[in-house]
Image (cartoon, rainbow, N blue to C red):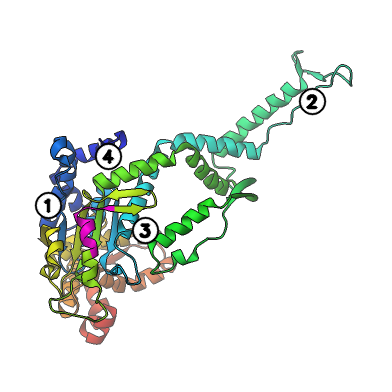
Amino acid sequence: MATNRTEQALARLADLTPKKIVAELDRYIIGQADAKKAVAIALRNRWRRQRAPEGIREEIAPNNIILIGPTGVGKTEIARRLAKLTGAPFIKVEASKFTEVGYVGRDVEGMVRDLVESAIDLIRTEREQEVEDLAHDKVDDRLLDLLLPAPAEVPAKSDTGGTERVFVASSEGNVTAEQDAAKERHKRTRDKLKQLLLDGQLEQREVEIEVTQHGPPMMDMGTQPGAPDAMSNLGEMLSELMPKRKKKRTTTVAEARRVLLDEEYDKLINHDDVIADAMERVEKLGIIFLDEIDKIAGAKGEMGGPDVSREGVQRDLLPIVEGSNVPTKYGMVKTDHVLFVAAGAFHVSKPSDLIPELQGRFPIRVELKPLTEADFVRIMTEPENALTKQYAALVAAEGASLEFTDDAITEIARMAAHVNSKMENIGARRLHTVMTTLLEDVMYELPDRGTAPIKVDGKVVRERLKAIAEDEDLRRYIL
């Protein structure tokens, strides 16, 4: 049975119907309706499975997906936006960085361990948001203690050994003990300091704090490229066993706030609960985006060569995709209900070049269409993160404004489509190269040219890119 927190995560999915998921993806990704529809259904099925009768719930396997299409058409962007939308544990990994067991390199189980780490970070962030106000209050109190230490206690002399306590009289004639007067003065000063602290006027004041001094890394070999994950885990465990030493350091209030806030979060958040919740969240809602899967699919009959381990990687992937127990430093993780979304251009190989057993574990296949000139126009105008809007924001940071006319956008789209047709088709990424070349002088001169508005029309685009577009060598190396 799912914990309350996992139920809350599933409840967030309840409002995301497939149509709403597609609508959200449409805000950032142009076209590719089939791919959006497929991932929306797969995501909704996560919630549906949890609502199924308990007897059949464990039998419902996720429908893993392969997205097939050339680079730059939106495969990775779909997965990235999907993760932000759902708040589910998510990682993106490159299939090409894994090697068969017995070769130097990362083993495929590393992706599950990375997913667990991602889930822990996700859930810790959620917990921090829940206790954020309390943590900040505690940090403010600690900073005030550092800025204004409490007054020392005034020792009372015994009747047999010395003078009696000293009393002072206030202007109203009330008599108070010296110690009470000191406490009252301290409280008034502390209240004034607190207001200054809350107003941000003490951020550069220096204070002395005690920080934990971590020892040197125990296993440097665990951090080297190609080192097994187990070596890294061993190094972390040995580091945790080493005694933590404290040392005093003088720093600004702003820096001290960051250090103290981390300490307060550690006190307020139960790390064991975070790990338990993360493990459950991974098993029920985890998503792994496996990019460049075509790089481990060799053409039939191809033998030997530097990629001899590609079929071995597929065989290592098979048990994880179909469901197995993967050991992590936090315990065993079942991958039976982790959703795998694979993607690849498949220029050289084909999905049928994957071993049959792995093909069967990705029953949903969606072919993404190459982007056209009309798609480029939409990409530059419709999404909330369109390139034209990004560059306008960059220019606005210098106090100027940037405007693209309709014919300028049409000309940029035509240029990008033309270059893609003459050279390697890198999809929407070609717009980045064209825009960078087009606005290079503008961005370079911007700080010195003042705040006059900048207008880019079709004539400016043609004049700026004409020489490059007509010269094949320049086009190849610049665009």
In the image shown, does 215 or 144 lie closer to the viewer? 215
Residue 99 vertical position relative to residue 383 in the rendered view, above or below = below
Q: Residues within 10 Å of mark 1 (few under 14, many from 20)?
A: some
Quadrant in the picture for residue 99: bottom left
Q: Which residue is mark 1?
A: 37
Q: Is residue 218 visible?
A: yes
Q: Which residue is disc 2 drawn over? A: 155
Q: Which callout, 4 or 3, points at the residue further toward the start of the chain?
A: 4
Q: Which of the numbered marks, if any, corresponds to residue 396?
A: 3
Tell me the quadrant of the picture where the N terminus can be found.
Answer: top left
Range drawn in magenta: 316-325
Tag 4, which secondary structure?
A: helix
Report the residue marked by disc 4. 9
Q: Nearer the viewer, mark 4 or mark 3?
A: 4
Kindly check if marks 1 and 4 are in contact, taking CB atoms under 8 A apart as contact: no
Picture layout, residue 400 above or below residue 203: below
What residue is shown at x 30% (from left), y 35% (from top)? 3
Residue 318 among those drawn in magenta? yes
- Numbered label attached to residue 192: none
User: Are circles 4 and 2 on residues that touch, CB within 8 Å?
Assistant: no
Relative to 53, is 313 above or below? Answer: below
Alpha carbon separation for disc pair 4 and 2: 57 Å
Cα separation, mark 3 vs mark 1, equals 37 Å
192 or 41, nearer to the observer: 41
